[in-house]
Image (tube, rainbow, N blue to C red):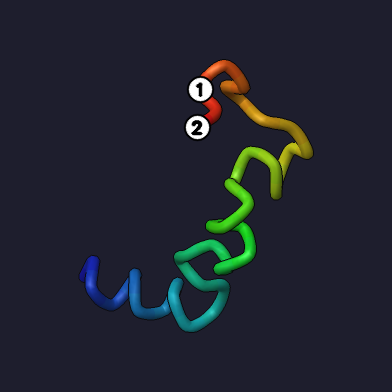
Amino acid sequence: MALIFWGILKAVIGIRISEESEDVGVDVAECGMEAYPEFKQ
């Protein structure tokens, strides 16, 4: 049942973020700011 649910979810809206958001960071991509700026590398 779960496999069917995740398959439908993946086909309809996707279950991963875009590669751009991965590179920039999800905090910046979705909120426009860093969540933990003190941990910059």
Quadrant assignment, res 17: bottom right
Horizontally, residue 29 falls left or right of residue 21, namely right
Give the CA separation, mark 1 to mark 2: 6 Å
Q: Residues within 10 Å of mark 2 (few under 14, many from 20)?
A: few
Number of numbered tags placed on the structure image: 2
| Label 1 element class | helix
Give SS at disc 2. Answer: loop
Q: Which residue is mark 2?
A: 41
Residue at 42%, 79% in the rendered image: 8
Q: Position of residue 23 (x, y in %)?
A: 57, 57
The vertical placement of 19 against 32, above or below, is below
Residue at 54% of width from left, 79% of height from top?
Answer: 12
- The amino acid type of the residue labelled 2 equals Gln
- Image location of residue 33, percent across then percent down: 74, 32
- Residue 18 image position (x, y, % from top left): 58, 67
Q: Are marks 1 and 2 in contact (CB under 8 Å)?
A: yes
Which of the numbered marks, if any, corresponds to residue 10? none
- Say which amino acid is labelled 1: Phe
Question: Mark 1 sits on what residue?
Answer: 39
- Answer left or right for 21 relative to 8: right
Asked if residue 34 lies left or right of residue 1, the reply is right
